[in-house]
Amino acid sequence: MIDANSQFFAILTDVGMAKQANADALGIPWLITQMGVGDANPNGLADPPNPVPSTSQTKLLNEWRRKPLNQLKIDPVNPAVIIAEQIIPADEGGKWIREMGLYDADGDLVAVANCAPSFKPLLSQGSGRTQIVRMNFIVTSAGNIQLKIDPSIVLASRAYVDAAILEVLPKNKGPGEYTRVKVNDRGLVVSGDSPDTLAKMGIADAYTKTEIDSMISPLAARTGRLIGRQIIKATGQYVPTPGMKFVRVRAIGGGGGSSGTPPTGSASNSASGGGASGSWAEGWFTADEIAAGVLVTIGDGGAGGAAGAAGQPGGMTSVGALMGCPGGGGSPLPNTVATSTSALWGAGVPGPLAYGGNVINSAGMCGEGGMSVINSVLPGVGGSSPFGSGGHASNSAQPGSGFGAGASGVHAATNSAAKPGAAGSKGVAIFEEYA
């Protein structure tokens, strides 16, 4: 009979104590594999007595279930106590549990315990449940005791799963948004941070803030009151306005001239291409960088070719040795072709890239080629510049407008006399001065 004086405990059997001593002495693992449960009532009594575990036991009094362990661990509070756990599914039972035993890999009963009676119902009884049974027993040393399980047939308790998840996903990372995270070989985030500089991000092929500041500081400092604007259209000296601290200089070379056309007959035609625009540049300079009285050379527009002659390139515009802008190329001499023949005649090409500008250095714009397509002839348009438009196609060659633009070609239909080309527009240098 179970009453308030009943005692419940677990002990190692004689076989268990011998095996543990042997494991401790030889340093070999001792594999505990299964747990058995029984009702301790082999005679079917209505109220069987409380079983008392004995070290001499080699089996339970009336075992009705023996299955692999789900867990075997050391008590975190007392390292001399081993905790064994087994889960009984809801579809097993219909019997009392009053005794438990542990078996090792050899099938020997190595620990035995009694417990307060607990009835494990079946689902068919209307009160099925999954039940966890545990045995705590004292050992002299837990170092060589190991659990041997088959993961395919054991069940895990919720507490075990929760602990396992917390072990894999420990609560050791601060919540928040991160621009960079580090993951392990299972794809789990293990750390995160939010670098605030390119260097901290490990990006090496970019300018730092300090480097960018140093590059833009000269331009950023160039703010002030506009005190003068000089547009130099002819070669001469630049004389700074008194009080000038820095100046914005924009310059362009002369535009290329277009070629003339040879005379055509009753069954031939011709058309010349347009000249290219001059190269151009822009730069900011301090009063110390641009000498007073510096010579500014303005490039002339390239001359148009006489009847049957090629156009000439534009001249170079320069600001002392500080800045240079070559002129645009003139268009080459076209020939005549039969009116039934398609043809394309060349146009002027830009000169070399401008130099000396610390904002921009650019080549000019190519002119268009002349074209003949079955009785129709079209002269090429001149190359446009930032300061002027290229000459437009016409029966006669048109010069470039503004500054640095190329001239257009000339149209020569059948029975045309030789026609001359036109000149490109000259270059310019513009000085905006700031105090």
Image (cartoon, rainbow, N blue to C red):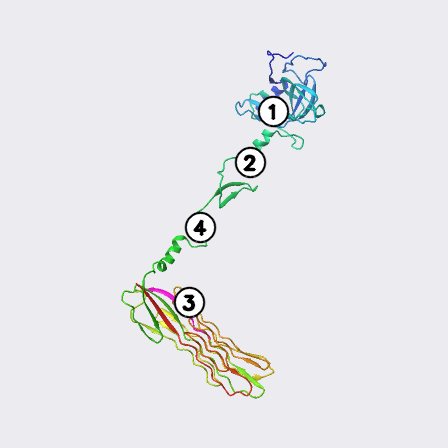
Q: Are marks 1 and 2 in contact (CB under 8 Å)?
A: no
x then y, percent, for residue 14: 62, 17
Q: Say what amino acid the circle numbered 3 marks.
A: Asn
Label located before the other in sequence (3 or 4): 4
Which segment is the magenta one? 276-285
Label located before the other in sequence (1 or 2): 1
Res. 267 image quadrant? bottom right
Q: Which residue is mark 2?
A: 168
The answer to whether residue 193 is above or below residue 116 is below
Q: Say what amino acid the circle numbered 4 marks.
A: Leu
Q: Is residue 352 left or right of residue 28?
A: left
Q: Which residue is mark 1?
A: 84
As measured in the structure, the alpha-carbon distance from the residue carrying label 2 to the one carrying label 3 is 61 Å
Label located before the other in sequence (1 or 3): 1
In the image, which disc is placed on residue 361? 3
Label located before the other in sequence (2 or 3): 2
Q: Say what amino acid the circle numbered 1 marks.
A: Ala
For mark 1, does the 10 Å Cα neighbourhood hold few (<14), some (14 to 19), or many (20 or more) residues?
A: many
In the image, which disc is placed on residue 71? none
Q: Which residue is mark 4?
A: 198
Q: Say what amino acid the circle numbered 2 marks.
A: Val
Is residue 28 something one can see in this rendering?
A: no
Tag 4, which secondary structure? helix
Q: Are marks 2 and 3 in contact (CB under 8 Å)?
A: no
x then y, percent, for residue 337: 57, 83
